[in-house]
């Protein structure tokens, strides 16, 4: 199974063309309060010059991907958190590679959703926009998000790195699956675990001796310095008018750290998540608040499916999200 991130996912959604409107069951009837909230946000959005989006697992859930810990935090009776460490890979690379091969297969079966495409479109239309994703599933890349405006804070399932101390090989956006014939069994959900010798695991094409590992950040490892620096440089380069917190909480780190820094600059916050806790509740405002009266607002919250909310909220810049009939059905046959 090989997936080209461009041909696979560039076409299901487009913007401002007279084709078939995307249905939205969530936003068909907004209350007056919710409509006022959206209007004031969009008014501020129009005035914003520099925007940062921080994306979390809730956005992947909208594409049908389970969270990292999955059901009960187990993968084939193994604790997923215990498999995501350098020590686990050193002790049993076969087990760890099968775990990540199964995750790669699940990610490839999933489709980018409307919010992925909306953020990709925003990047094309706004040079001073940056997406910082905590997700490793490659869905933003497959939605054709401009790579120079997309940072992967936790790495990617589709990046590979050599484990040899003397080798610097790294490859990004490697969507071929499985990586070896032996790893194909990991994609079969009901198949029993079978140990794979090291000869059947991915090896480095550069040094030919080192094992390859998934290019994700494991527990106990530092976040990638290049990514952290790029995000810091973006924030330090000038006032960030708005941070979009999508599919994650703005009250836990690392999201909270970026939210705090942008607020200290005078920027504002918009949270899009399936659950909004009390600490993230928006500012109080009159039900019939004018869309121009956003000067005293510091935060907006949009509770519900981010895949539905984000494209609508960004319409003043990206236009309406449209669905090209027949394309998604054809595209879904690629995996």
Image: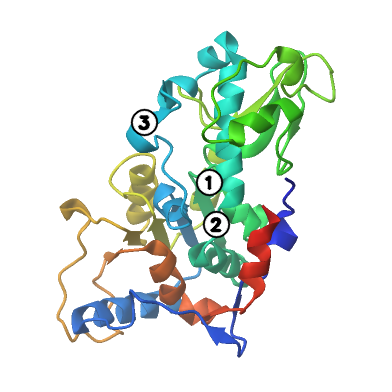
Is residue 236 something one can see in this rendering?
A: no
> In the drawing, does residue 56 fall left or right of residue 111?
left
Q: Quadrant of residue 42?
A: bottom left
Task: Determine the secondary structure under disc 3.
Answer: helix
Is residue 153 something one can see in this rendering?
A: yes
Please state which of residues 154 and 284 is positioned toward the viewer in this rendering: 154
Farthest residue, direction bottom: 18
| Residue 193 horizontal/vertical position (percent) | 55, 21
Do the CB atoms of the residues marked 2 and 1 lie less than 8 Å apart? yes
> In the drawing, does residue 248 fall left or right of residue 173?
left
Say which label, 2 or 1, has the lower sequence index: 2
Q: Mark 2 points at which residue?
A: 130
Q: Residue 73 carries which label?
A: 3
Do the CB atoms of the residues marked 2 and 3 lie less than 8 Å apart? no
Q: Residue 329 carries which label?
A: none
Say which label, 2 or 3, has the lower sequence index: 3
Q: How crowded is mark 3: few (under 14 residues within 10 Å), some or many (20 or more)?
A: some
For image coordinates 37% across by 48% down, the residue present is 261
Q: Residue 231 carries which label?
A: 1
| Residue 161 horizontal/vertical position (percent) | 69, 27
């Amino acid at each position: 199974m090989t997936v080209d991130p461009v041909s696979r996912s560039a076409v299901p959604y487009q913007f401002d063309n007279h084709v078939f409107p995307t249905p939205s069951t969530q936003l068909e009837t907004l209350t007056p309060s919710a409509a006022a909230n959206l209007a004031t946000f969009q008014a501020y959005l129009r005035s914003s010059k520099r925007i940062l989006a921080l994306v979390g697992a809730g956005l992947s859930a909208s594409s049908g991907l389970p969270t990292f810990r999955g059901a009960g935090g187990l993968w084939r009776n193994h604790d997923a958190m215990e498999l995501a460490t350098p020590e686990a890979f050193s002790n049993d690379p076969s087990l760890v590679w099968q775990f990540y091969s199964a995750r790669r297969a699940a990610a490839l079966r999933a489709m980018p959703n409307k919010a992925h495409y909306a953020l990709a479109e925003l990047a094309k239309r706004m040079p001073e926009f940056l997406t910082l994703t905590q997700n490793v599933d490659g869905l933003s890349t497959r939605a054709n998000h401009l790579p120079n405006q997309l940072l992967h804070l936790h790495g990617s399932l589709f990046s590979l790195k050599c484990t040899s101390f003397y080798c610097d090989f790294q490859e990004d956006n490697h969507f071929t699956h499985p990586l070896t014939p032996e790893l194909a069994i990991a994609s079969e959900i009901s198949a029993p675990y079978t140990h794979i010798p090291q000869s059947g695991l991915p090896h480095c094409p550069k040094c030919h001796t080192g094992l390859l590992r998934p290019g994700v950040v494991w527990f106990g490892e530092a976040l990638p310095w290049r990514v952290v620096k790029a995000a810091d440089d973006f924030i330090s380069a000038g006032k960030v008018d708005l941070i979009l917190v999508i599919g994650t909480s703005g009250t836990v780190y690392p999201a909270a750290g970026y939210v705090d820094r942008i607020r200290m600059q005078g920027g504002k916050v918009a949270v899009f998540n399936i659950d909004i806790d009390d600490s993230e509740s928006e500012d109080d405002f009159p039900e019939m608040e004018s869309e121009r009266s956003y000067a005293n607002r510091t935060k907006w919250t949009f509770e519900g499916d981010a895949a539905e909310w984000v494209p609508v909220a960004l319409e003043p810049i990206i236009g309406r999200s449209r669905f090209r009939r027949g394309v998604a059905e054809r595209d879904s046959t690629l995996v």
